[in-house]
Structure formats: C-alpha cells, structure tokens
Amino acid sequence: MVRFMLRPAAVAAALLLSPMLAQARVVAIGIAKSNNHVYAWHDDRTVTSGSPTDFELHRKADAYGLPSGLKPSNIVGIAIDTNDRVHAWYSNGTHSIGHSKDLDAYQAAQNFSLPAGRTPADIVGIAFNSAGNVYTWYDDASVSIGQPQTLGTIQAPLGVALPADQTVEDILEVDISAADRVVTWFRDGRFTIGKSRDLDAYQAATGFRSSRLISRYWGPLTLTFPPLSMERTEPEPQPDRPLEAAMLTDELARLATGHRATDTSDTPFRAAPAWNERFPANTGRAIDSMVAAGHDYLIASDTATLRFLDRDGNLLEGKSGFPTSLSTTSFFGGFLQESNADGSFNDSNVNHFLGYDDRCDSTAFPVTSGNRFCLTSFYDTRVHYDAASRRFFVIANSRHPVWTSSSGGNCLRYTDGNGNPVDTANYCGAQRRLIALAVSRTSDPRDGFHQYMITDNIYRDFPWMAINGDRVVVGGVGRESNDTTTPVATVLDTSDLRLGDRHPAYVQYFSGDLGGSIRAIPVRHFNDGAGKSLLLDGSGSTLKIIALPSGADAWTKGTPETTSVTIAQGLSNMPAATYRNGFLYFAQRTIAETVGDETRRSVRLVRVPLQIAGSGLTASTDPADGYIEQHFGLHSLDDAPTDRISYEAPSLAVNASGDMLFGYARYPFETVNPLLPEARYSLWRSNLTLERSALLQAGQATCDETPAEAVDYTTVDVDPVDGQSFWMALPFCSSNNRYDTVIGRVTP
C-alpha cells in the first residue's frame, strides 16, 4: 500500500511541471448500501462523498491510497458491498478490498477473472446489488453477473439498452443503489436510473455536478491546450439594468425625504500632486476598467478583455505563443470547449455541469442568439494583485444569452435566432451565471494561471473578490436575485489556489449563515484583521458588517460575527471597500441635486472605526473615534465659482500612511466654460486635509452618454512596491467619441 498523507495541495505542487494540470477527473464511483451516499474517486488521488446529483454534498476532497505500484489511472472500477467495504478492480487484473481512503486496507490486491473474451480494459462500470452479487458492464454494451474475483460466473454478458442519445463511450460509471436501482452517470453531466439491462427505465437523464470547483490551467506549461480564437467582434447586447434603476430610485427617495449631500468647503486651495506616470489602457472599452499593480508587472482589464503590461504601460511580449492581450472569453475559454486540442474529451467543460435535464445545446431549448442555452462568454472581469503572495487574481462571470425578464408574468428573456427579444415563462430557472477565478502561477502573468469555475449558479450581478492572507473571498455586489439557496460568499484557501490544487479547500456561506443577507461585498484587507475576512451588506441607513473567521482548517466553516451601524445612507451602488489599520473605508456616488430629469452627483466618503481583533467585532460612528461621513464635489482649481459639476463612479484606496486617494470621472452639470468628460483624482491626506482634485486625463469629446450612463466603476489601488503610491484606471471621453481608460500613478 502506498500511503498519501499529504494534503491535495502538496500533491498538486509535485505535479506543477505536468502539462496536464486540468480538471480532477472522476475515475470511479460507488454507492454505499447503508446510506446511499455516493463516493467519487478522482485522478488527483482524492475521494469525495455526496449524492447522485452532487458528489461533494456530504464530504469534501480527502486523500486516498492505492496498492503499491498502482495509480488512479489503473482503476477500472470501484464498488461498495453490503457491509460498506470498498472493492477496487485494476487494469493489471487485480482486485483489492479496503475503505474509501485506503483501497487495500482489508485485502491486498489479488487476481480476478472475467468472462471469456473480456479484459479489464473493457470494463465501464462495476456494482454490488443487495444480494452481494457483482454486476459488470462492458464497452460492447453488455452486462455480466458474478462475484468480486470471478466477474461472470453467475450470468454471462447480455445486451444492455442505453438512452437514445448516449453511447457506451459516454458512460462515466455505473453503480447500484440500496434499492437495487441502477444509476448511470454520463460524461456530459447527466445521470439516469434504470435496470441492469435498461439504463433509463425509471428516470430519464438529469443533471449532476462532480465538483463544486472545476479546474484548468492556462499558460505556456499547458502545451496541449493552446489559446482559443474566441474574440468577440462586437459587444454583446447588455441586459436591462434593474440594479442601476433600483440605485437611482433609492437615491431619489432619499432626496424626497430631505436628504442632501453637502459639498465640502472650498478650502484648502492646494491641489493634489500631479501624476508620476500616465498611459492608455488600450483595452478597447472603459466599462468596468481596472488595473492590478504588481511588483514588476500590471494587468489592465475592462468588462471583457485583459492586457499584461510592464509598469510603464508597454504590452509584454508573450511566452510560448500565449497572448498578452486577449478577451476574457479567450482567457477562460478552455471551460467552454467540447474537446481538448488533442481531440480528447474535455472534462472541465462547464456546460456539462449546468444541471439541465437535457444538454444545453439540445433542440428542446429555443434557439438563442448564437447558441441554445450553453454558456458562451465571460464578462464583468475584475483583476487584483496580492502583495503577500505576489500573485495576480482574475475573476469574471460567465453567461449565456438568457436574462431575467422585465415583463410581467414572465421569468426570462432571450434573443431568438432572428435577433428578436422573447419574454417567456416556459424555461423558468434556466438562467445560468457561473463565476470563474484564476490565480497566476508566479508574479509574472505570462507564466500562466490556475483557473477555476464555481459550479453554483449565482444569478447576482457584479462579482467581486478580496484576498486576505490565507483566504480568498468571492462574492457579488449586485442584488438581481433574492435567492437564498445559492452561496452568498465562497471562501477558498489561497495556498491551494497558488499551487493549482485541483480540489482546493473552500467553504461556502449562504443567506442563513449571514443573518439573511442575500448579497455580501468582500472587503479588501492589507493582511490585517486578526485572520478574519470582512463582508458588507447595506440597505436604507443600516450598514451590516460581517466577519468570517479563518481557522487552521480551510474546509471548516466558522461562525460569522456581525455588527451594524446606522449611517446617513446605505450602500446604494458598488463601493470598493478597504479595511486598514482599524478603519473600514468605502466611497460611492451620492446625489447632490436634481433639476428636472438631470441629476448631479458628488463623492461620498465613509470611514468607520472597526475593531475585529479577538472574538469581538465593534464598530463606531463617533467622530471622536475617527468616524467620517462626508461629501465633496467642488475640488478643481480650474472650476469657476458658480460651476456645478457631477462626479461619477468614485473609487478609493488607502496607503500605508493612511492617505486616501479618490479616482472618478467628472462631467458638467452647469459650467461657465465647456467641460468634456474627464478623469480626475483627489487626495485626502492622513491628517484629514482634503486637497483639490488633479487632472489625470482631459476629455477630448462630448460622448453620446454621460459617465453615469456608460461607466460602472473606476479603480484605485496601492502600489505594492512602496505601499505609498497609488495606481488608477479612470475613464474619459476620447477623441473617437467613446469612453476610453487612462492608467496613472501618483505619489502623495
């Protein structure tokens, strides 16, 4: 027996140089007769326990051992007998008996026999029935009955009927439940229930998922998986913006009750320092613009593209033919391929794990614009850099062309093959949004990324993430869904992700775990916070702060701590929040005034004193403790005294000294001289001196839309090299009359 006492992450570390770092493939499945739990053994030497529809429902990945000299690829079948002992059969013609984590604990491997003309390579499934007999299915669509070491002695192989749309090559594994029903799992992510010779006699195919996290590798080490050519030639149609409409409604409601943002005094008259460095992002769009600043490199992104740059803004030269400027759909595109470059089946195709009763490209679903109901693209791209691990992180949503419907009585909307919008109630629950996550293998993004997809359907807009030491927190900012059955936050082990562990440790928090919260915004930490990761939820005038514990076991979900404070207004849009040195910070837009249908916005800063050390979580709104809630919007020395200017999509970062930098787009509400939509920033020094704004990039045209209509958010980040300088990705109206992104760096 070979014992594997290392955690799966250590196993992954040993495999880093392998060109086949991809999804952990299921090599065998067995059903325990005592409780009908489904055990799945994977080729990364881990075993999970769950149900026919969810292989990780009861137990997450744990290491298992094999007889000496054997590998997971040698397993041809595993079955669990009536005494819950695990039997394994191998390609070398031997059979062992053990338990789920030790396959020969009770009996060393011994030879077994097969029916005439059959070899171990012909086996596609093995199972025990309640009488203790062994059923064996073969690749010629036949089944025999025998005993563990004599597989065909009771009944010679007889023919088997498969579902009409499946072949023997499609079978992943076959087993028998405690009720003597035959369960067959297929590689397209569906399973049936039937008889030994009629595999769907009792239940037609329905969806399952083999893992909560599907993994791949993108980069020069994966020579068998070249980059895809999936660049989009034009932006995909955007859905209605119910979230934005709700934000505006909330803001107008506050105005109606007399709430007004009060601009800060015009003094002092000193402007923020001029930028040190400036260059265009060249991503093609200014929607969702971000920059992640590393020690040696940068990643710039917008909603659908990525660019790998040096710190002067130059596009990096690629390695081994892998691009450094590409769409997010190309970057994560390996999750959408039917097969790998060598023609082999792609086990990490997420379209096999959507949970549909039929394939997503089935004609049972209506034709949508470009496909049926399969996921086809990635969007809402976010990029981050973690200075502690020196790794870049990328997160995005995946989607298909189906959205929640805004039409009464209908549940969804799609665009048919003729480009016409269709509202319907015929396919309720068919919407799918799966979050993708990638972690760079080194501090150089050209060295490749370990990629993951969370197979839970999260129909919430605006995915967000934060890295806090040994934990990565993934959540969503938007509230397009009131669903309480899908996770609000997924917390993953940072070291497992860095090592490319194909079964990384994680826990998930649901609405019931978080006191009813259906959304939770991850808060960025700077490796402080007593090992706890913060989430924010806010509505009305209540700001709810949630602290997730970070224990030694990354597989164990701790009990969150919560506290709430009353503030002037809640989180009506998407703040990028930061916790640093005992304070929680966030910035967002707020309405300063309305004239008819026109709205002028200013910048709102909130700083909450927050203590999260030990077992308590204490927040304060006492100015004596350092609480700040203030608005500003008259901070350019170039403005005329009577100018009223709107500030849009503000972002905020805090450096090691406690200085705050705000980045935003500015455009005219009522000005003496023409003002084109521009990129600006303001510095609020640690001594609470707010300096007038400085120009990063002047506007060059008017643009057909205001930043409020065209821009979701901006980005400000702290330079990891000195902990003092700030990087910004801000929009401006360019000479081609569209919003482009400028990237800049400024040192206080």
Image (cartoon, rainbow, N blue to C red):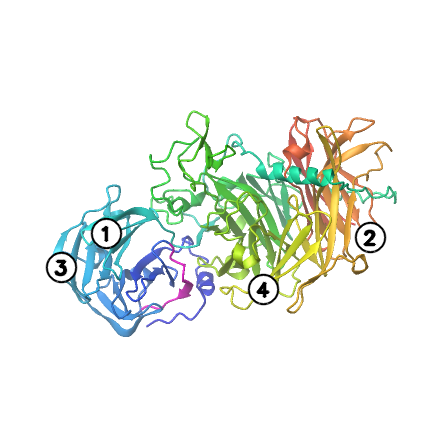
Residue corresponding to mark 2: 688
Q: Find residue 530 and report its horizontal and vertical position in percent.
A: 64, 66
Image: magenta residue range: 54-66
Give the mark nearest the N terminus, 1 or 3: 3
What type is the residue that disc 3 sits on? Pro
- Is label 4 in a helix, a strand or a loop? loop
- Is label 2 in a helix, a strand or a loop? loop
Q: Is residue 443 left or right of residue 135?
A: right
Cα gap from disc 2 to disc 4, whole angstroms = 32 Å
Q: Tell me the residue at 48%/51% (across/down).
A: 486
Few, some or many residues within 10 Å of mark 1 (<14, 14–19, 20+): some
Q: Is residue 634 left or right of residue 465?
A: right
Residue corresponding to mark 1: 194
Residue corresponding to mark 3: 115
What type is the residue that disc 2 sits on? Leu
Mark nearer the viewer, 3 or 2: 2
Q: Find residue 710 and report its horizontal and vertical position in percent.
A: 64, 33
Cα gap from disc 3 to disc 2, whole angstroms = 83 Å
Cα gap from disc 1 to disc 4, whole angstroms = 45 Å
Give the mark nearest the N terminus, 1 or 4: 1
> Which of the labelled discs sits on residue 549, or is there none?
4
Mark nearer the viewer, 1 or 4: 1
Cα gap from disc 1 to disc 2, whole angstroms = 71 Å
Q: Tell me the residue at 26%/44% (across/down).
A: 166
Give the mark nearest the N terminus, 3 or 2: 3
